Amino acid sequence: LSTALDEMSRTITDHDGVVAGFQGDAVMGFWGWPEEQDRQVELAAKAALRIQDRFEKAHKEFKCGLGLAHGRAVAG
C-alpha cells in the first residue's frame, strides 16, 4: 500500500498538482491551489490517466478507482 500511495503522490506532483492529504488508501490532490493554473483540468486528467495506467500494468492485485471534480471549493 505504501508503494501505491507513493506512486499516486509522485504522479500528482509530476503533473504540477499538490498532495493535500491521505484518506485511508487514497491520495487527495489539488490543481490550481494555492496558485492558479490555466491547465489545471488537463493536468488533473492526465495524472488520473497515468495513475490508472500504472496500476493496470504494475499493480494488478489492486483495483484503482479515480474521481475528478472541477469548480470552486473551500479548502482548509
Image (cartoon, rainbow, N blue to C red):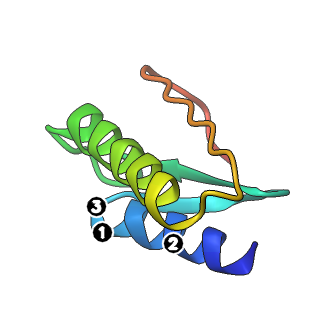
Give whichever of discs 2 and 3 has the lower sequence position.
2
Q: At x 58% / y 77%, what residue is drawn?
A: 6
Quadrant of the image containing the N terminus: bottom right
Q: CA distance from mark 2 to mark 3?
A: 14 Å
Q: Which is more foreground, mark 2 or mark 1?
A: 2
Q: Which is more foreground, mark 2 or mark 3?
A: 2
Residue 63 vs 60, above or below: the answer is above
Q: Which mark is residue 7?
A: 2
Tag 1 near tag 3, CB within 8 Å:
yes
Amino acid found under the numbered disc labelled 3: Asp
Q: Position of residue 22 (x, y in %)?
A: 73, 60
Residue bearing the label numbered 1: 14
Q: Position of residue 24 (x, y in %)?
A: 85, 57
Q: Position of residue 39 (x, y in %)?
A: 16, 39
Q: CA distance from mark 1 to mark 3?
A: 6 Å
- Residue sticking out furthest to the left: 38
Judged from the image, the secondary structure of the residue bearing numbered disc 3 is loop
Q: Which mark is residue 22?
A: none
The image quarter containing residue 10 is bottom left
